[in-house]
Image (cartoon, helix red, strand yellow):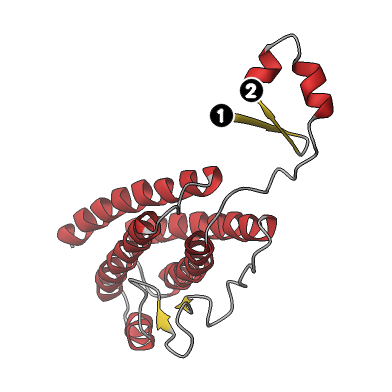
Amino acid sequence: MRRFVRAGIIVPVLALLTGAGREVAAQAPAVPAAVGRHTAADTRFMQGMIGHHAQAMVMAAMAPSHGASPQVALFARKIFQSQRDEIELMQTWLRDHGERAPDASDPHAGMDMSMPGHMMLMPGMLTPEQLAQLDAARGVAFDRLFLTFMIQHHRGALTMVAELFAAPGSGQEPELFGYATGVDADQRAEIERMERMLAAL
């Protein structure tokens, strides 16, 4: 049954549509609107994606100073703004669900810490060497590397979404489900766009 959330109280929609709706709403216990069923995999996804997005912002921020073409510079600006907004959304979700919300500037924010002592970069993230290579490029060389590396980065995000939904019971919390499916659709569309831009260079 779909549920209607308002003023921190969760009330069945059907109850509101009946004559007893007001009475039911008055008797319903107050439940924080943010409380929902989420799994450890849900938390790892949101925490890891914060670091993943943060690196995309670092890459995109290079465009103005590295001689990016107008088309690539505009695309990079779009990525920067969207990733920044999504980081705030993910941090809010984590706090609302009583989980740690990583600081996007934390160098370990993009690490998979699910296995202590075996920290690895989240899928698709650039290595320090690749970031240095991108930072050293200028003009058309920057455009080519930026698009190549961002495609790699976006494909990593698709892997993260796939891993989330592959985990039993995960990805079902309504807000997270909407976000994760949106990430999948947006990243696929942007990969196609970047592949066209790369082919035109």
Q: Amino acid at mark 1?
A: Arg
Question: Which is nearer the eye, 149 or 138?
Answer: 149
Q: Secondary structure at mark 1?
A: loop
Give the residue drawn at x 42%, y 88%: 118
The picture places residue 158, in percent across and down from the top left corner, at 33, 58
Question: Which is nearer the eye, 155 or 147?
Answer: 155
Q: Quadrant of the C terminus?
A: bottom left
Identify the residue under disc 1. Answer: 2
Q: Residue furthest top?
A: 19
Q: CA distance from mark 2 to mark 1?
A: 7 Å
The image shows residue 128, relative to residue 86, as above or below, that is: below
Q: Amino acid at mark 2?
A: Val
Q: Which mark is residue 13?
A: 2
| Tag count | 2
The picture places residue 84, in percent across and down from the top left corner, at 55, 60
Give the residue drawn at x 35%, y 83%: 127
